Structure formats: C-alpha cells, structure tokens
Image (cartoon, rainbow, N blue to C red):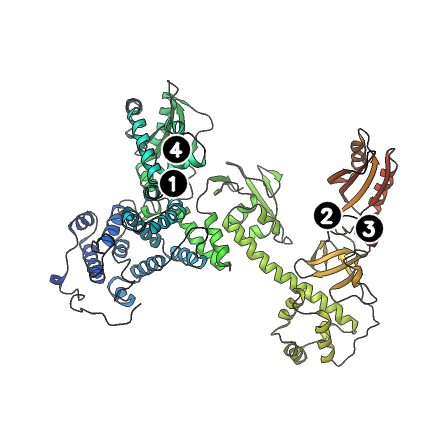
Amino acid sequence: MSDRAIPNQILLDFSNKKLLSPVPKKLYESAKAYFSEKELELLQTAYNVAFEAHKDQFRKEGSAYITHPVAVASILIELHLDIETVCAGLMHDVLEDSFIKKSYLEKLFGKDVVAIVDGVSNLNKLDFDSIEDRNANNLQKMALAMSKDVRVIIVKLCDRLHNMRTIEFLPRDKQIRKSIETLELYGPIAIRIGMQNIRVELEDLAFQCLHPMRARMLESAIKQAVGGRKRIISKLRKQFKYHLKNNDILATVQGRQKSLHGIYHKIKHKKKPFSEILDVYAFRIIVNSVDDAYRSLGVVHNVHKPIGKKFKDYIAIPKSNGYQAIHTSLIALDGIPIEVQIQTKSMEIIAENGISAHWSYKTKDSLSSESIGAKKWIESFTDLDKASLDSHEFVEAIKTDLVYDEVYVFTPAGRIVNLKSGSTPIDLAYELHTELGNKAVACKVNRKYAPLNIRLENGQSIEIITSKKQEVSPDWLNFVVTSKARSSIRSALRHQKVSQSRKAGKLMLESELKRGGVTLDQYRGSTMSRILEVIGVKSLNELLTDLGSGKKTGALVAERFFAGLKIRKNKDSKIKAMVLADHQIEGVSVIYAKCCMPIHGDPITAHSDTDRGIVIHHARCRQVMPHRSHTLSSRYIPAMWGTDAEEIHYKGHVKIHAEDRPGILADIASVFTKSNLNIVNIQSRDIDAMIIEFIVEAEVLNTDSFNKLMIKLRSLRYVTSCSRIVNDTKTKNEKTNFYK
C-alpha cells in the first residue's frame, strides 16, 4: 500500500454533499428498494471513494474501470446483501494500486467493511495456474480470509461472475486459465455455500469459454429438444396445478431448466447419452408452508406413480449447505419420467442464494439458522490452521470437502449428522468431537458391532465406543474421507510420535545408566542443568525426544551423565531385561517385527526404531544378531515376556510341504479349526510335479500352542514336512517377501 498522502482532499471531503458524484441511476434505484436513507448516504460515499480511486483507470475493452465495481455492487444488491457488503463490493479494488489507505476507509465505513475489502484484495493477488498446481500458501490465505468473514467470498464470487461475463476481452491464454480456475475452484465453492444461481452461471460461462463449439452445438440441440417438448411440459404443468388447487394448495409450478455445463458434465463424466438426459421432465413446485409441501407430495404421488428409491426428504434432513426440498421421481401415464422438487418460498431463496440469504432484508431473521452447515464448513478452516497442517495438507483438506454427495446418520441421542458419502464411523467420531475420534476403539451400527472402516449408509444409528488407553492408528488414514478426520488424525499422530519418542528415549537412557549402576532419578537440580548444557539441549524432555527419534546416541549421552557424577561405566555389568506385557514395555506401546514374527514364549529383543517406536524381534532374527554381544548396543534392549492381563493372540507363520492330492488344503484347514486357531492368510506354490508348498499365517496364543499345532499337521497322511518360519540364521536362505 502506498504511504503517500491522499491527493484531492476537497473531493474526498464528503461533508459537502454538493461535491459528491451521483450514484449511477440504475444502481441507486435498485438500492432504494430496500436500503434506508442513512444506508443510501453510505452507498453514495462508497461510490465516490471508488470513483476517485479508479477515475484514471480503464478496463481491457476500453470502458472506465468504475463500471466493474458498480456491476459487482449491482449483483450484490440483486442478492439483497447488507449495506456493508454492497459498499465493500463497490470498493473491493480500491486498496490495490490506489492512493486509498485502510485507515482512511476505516474512519468512513468501520472495521467490518475494511475487513471485507482487505480480504477480497488479498484474494485478488492470488494467481492460480490450476487447482492442482496452485500455490498452496496462497490458497491457505484465501481460506482463512473466508473463515473470518464469509462475505469476503460472496463479494469475490460476484467479482468473478462479472469478470466471466466480460471475459472475451482478455487474451486467450488468460481466458483459459480463468475459466479452468472458475470450474475447479470458484464453482465448487459456490456449491458448498449453496449459491446455486451464481454457481450455474459461473460454470456455464466458463464452459462456453473453454469449449465454444461444443457449447453452441449443445445449445442448439437443447433448443430443438425443448421446442418439441413444449406441449408435454404445458400439459403436465396444468395437470399439477389443477390437482393442487383442488386440494386447496396455493402453489407455483415451474419447469426446471438444466444448466448447459450440467448437461455436458453428465454426458462426459457419467457417460449418459444426450437423449436420456433430456428425456426427463423436471418441475419445481413452490408452496407457502412446510405442511403444504408434504401435502403436495401426496397429491403428485396420487396423480402419477412414484419410482421406488427415488425419493429424498431434504426438508426433514437438510443438506450441509442449507438446501431444503422434497425430491421425488414419477412415471406419467405415457411412461414419461418426471422429476419434481417441492419447496417453500423461503427454501427457494436459500436454494438459489445459499449462505448469502442470511443477509436478505426479508428473511434475515428466519433464515439465520438455515446455512449453519455452510458456515460451519467455512469456519472449519480455522480449526485446520490450528491443527498445524502444512500448506499442502491444508489445501488437500479443503479440496476434499469442496464437492461431494452426502450421507446422514443418527447418534444414539437422535442427533442427525450429515457427512461426506463414503464416510466411516471414524469420520463421524471426529465430526462430533476430536477427542471422541482419538479414543475410538469400536462402534455399533444399528446396535450391532461393526468394524471402524465400514461405509455408513443413510438412516443408520451409529454409536462410537471409546477407551482411554486407545491411541490413534495411522491405518485410519487409509479409509477416512472427511478433511476434519484426516487432519485431526495427522495432528494426533505427530503429537503421538513425539510422546512415543520421548518414552522410548527414556527407556534407552535408563538402560544405559543401569550399566553404570545409577538411575535417572539421581540427576537433579544443577547437576542435570550442567549435563543438559554440555549436551546442547534446553530440557530433559528435549533430550529424551532426540534419543527416541535417533537424533542422539544413547551410549554417548550416557557418557555425559556418567561424567556428571564422576563415575565409570561398568562394562561388565548386565542389564536386567525389560518386561513385555499387554503389548507394552514400561508404558511404551510396542509393535511386532514382520521379519521374524515373535510369539509369546520366544526369546526376544526390543529395538528402539526411529520411525516405528519399540519393535519386538525374535532374539535370533537376522536384524538383531549382528548387534548381539555381551553388552547390547544402545538401541537394542534385552526383553522378556510378562503376564498379559487378557488373552492375546500373536501372528506366526508355518511352512507345510504336502503331496498334491485333492482335499489336502481342506485337511490342513481342519487342523487349525479343531485347534481353535484363526487362519489369517494362505499362500501356495508348486515345488515340483508332486509336492505343493503352503505358507499359512495364523493367530496363536504362544509357542506351546504353535508346537502342538505343528505336531498335528505332521500327523496328516500326505504332509511331508512342517516347520515354523523364523527369519533367523537357520533360515537365511528363505524368501521372506511374504511377511514384509
């Protein structure tokens, strides 16, 4: 922003009304219909600020630049936006390459108007090549500007609409770029906040610009088709009006026009022929009340036969963008397919104008709650920002939620929750509350237990079951579909990793200190501060995190601690083995190595892995053996099995060679069934013409049950050999891709 003084002070001193340039007549007449005298004076001031800021500027086609902000303001007035938004629309470009300062605008119009103008100005600086390779930081700024005041994006959409109406004056490369940007970004945003009329015109204009010949051919085909349909449309309209009137329902019956881009999208992406799309006759019935809407539904179903599974009640369960209507599909007597939408007048306003209807002069009070879903989506950008996502994750989250079909489910308390189609119970849990998602362990669908990755369907009742001990699983990222769930999981995993690293680091340091006959508790006050200063960290937590994440070596750190107490490390001392119980070692969760698949009862070693935390290996695993000595390296900790509080199953692999006979696989499977063991996976391959090899992954309790299993398998008539697969020195020639 320029800091130079504002010129022409006399012209900008609006105390003298005679010096004001009059607002264009058409704009003034539209505004006078619902603005007060005081609001009209503010509009007059805004126009003069814009006029002075742009008086020496011209558009590409040669017209005065002021015509553009006037056009934007006119669109906002058509939407019946409040005076603050209309003034902001008039001045949305004055902060760019102009002598006008924010402080000056704030004195004249207040902070809210300036915030909208500034927000739109920041959006104007964004330059997207495409939605795929746009600047992520810029889009993040845009989303956050929207979250502060939704009117920012409303003004921006109206700005983009007028620019698209005059796009033919731009160079062809800019036309293409702006049209793609409109289809991939601004159109979907308009859908998401329910501004249907704006969205339709934006998409049609962009489509006509990108594909002019296709658009002309499609328009011509539609005109021909509609021309031949007029008689049928007129007959059906009269029929609906007659029956509604006979049932004392005052209603307006309209033919519903399909958008140009909408038809093209169905042809291209849904592979529907043009004739099939145009064969459907669409109508909208506008009534005075919700009661009349449901009565009208009964009337149209009595007139024509409804099609099963083609009925949707968006009045009882509105869409997240505030849209409400009853949708039904019918078959006329001549076999003609009919689509009918039934709405009240206020619902029609919301369907056309979406969240902007919140500021409507007629419906401000009654509609303030109807666009809660759209507002919630926009406000969620702030939550995404607080989740400390990087720019690309932030963009991915926004992109994910731009356009989607919806599914609705019920909580046990009867609350209706709208979610993205394909959502899972984990998505629902995070939608309700972040902590509910973080602690989810199971769910009930219609009072029956179901997996957490099940796809939700309309009308289901979902109960989320939680546990304080539960930790977020990275596997959840493979099936969640909502941006809130995805961002919350990633944020939790980041914090979880730090916590796990800290626990693992403490375990490593304590095991090293035991070699010198000391404990961590012996280091306090100035002694600890001195040691941390020597190591180069600010706190013990930072040191433990660095140890657990592999940034520092346990043995070297321990030497600093020993020096702090002036003691020598006893190289001959043995470390007491850590106890593994309930999948934890001293409160640190563990995972079991897939390379050797240790089972309860095996000799084991705990490995502090930089990425995965504490990993339990079979003591004879080839990954562990090079590090085994009288004294294990600092990242390899001796471990032993403890007593589990509950019965826990472990996965193990058994290799079976058998004669290739009919029914041999069934015989092998029956042994597992009789042993009450679950088979997870089976792979087979031919060894030669007579022998077939089976590698079976099964869940077992301990080595004892595994050994009993192999005895039973060896007793089968056609089994020639049976052995457990462990990736140790004895099986170094085994191919182990199966386990990785």
Residue displayed at 81% across by 52% down: 732
Q: Secondary structure at mark 1?
A: loop
Neighbourhood count class around disc 3 (C-alpha, 10 Å): few under 14, some 14–19, many 20 upward? few
Element carrying mark 2: helix
Q: Which residue is mark 2?
A: 737
Foreground disc of the pair 1, 2: 2
* Cβ–Cβ under 8 Å for marks 4 and 2: no
Instruction: Work out which quarter of the rendered image holds the N terminus and state it.
Output: bottom left
Of residues 306 and 234, the one drawn nearer to the viewer in this rendering: 234
Q: Toward the viewer: 629 or 699? A: 629
Tell me the residue that label 3 is attached to: 731
Q: How many marks?
A: 4
Tell me, yes or no, whether the two marked residues, 1 and 4, touch with CB atoms within 8 Å: no
Q: Label 1 vs label 2: CA separation?
A: 52 Å
Rounded to the nearest angstrom, the CA distance separating label 1 from label 4 is 10 Å
Residue identified by numbered label 1: 323
Residue pictured at 56% horizontal, 53% vertical: 489
Choose mark 4 or mark 3, whichever is in front. Answer: 3
The percent coordinates of residue 736 (x first, y second) are 75, 48
Q: Earlier in the sequence, mark 4 or mark 2?
A: 4
- Side of 581 relative to 314 (left or right): right
Q: Earlier in the sequence, mark 4 or mark 3?
A: 4
Q: CA distance from mark 1 to mark 3?
A: 64 Å
How many angstroms separate mark 2 from mark 3 (CA)?
13 Å
Marks 4/3: CA distance?
67 Å
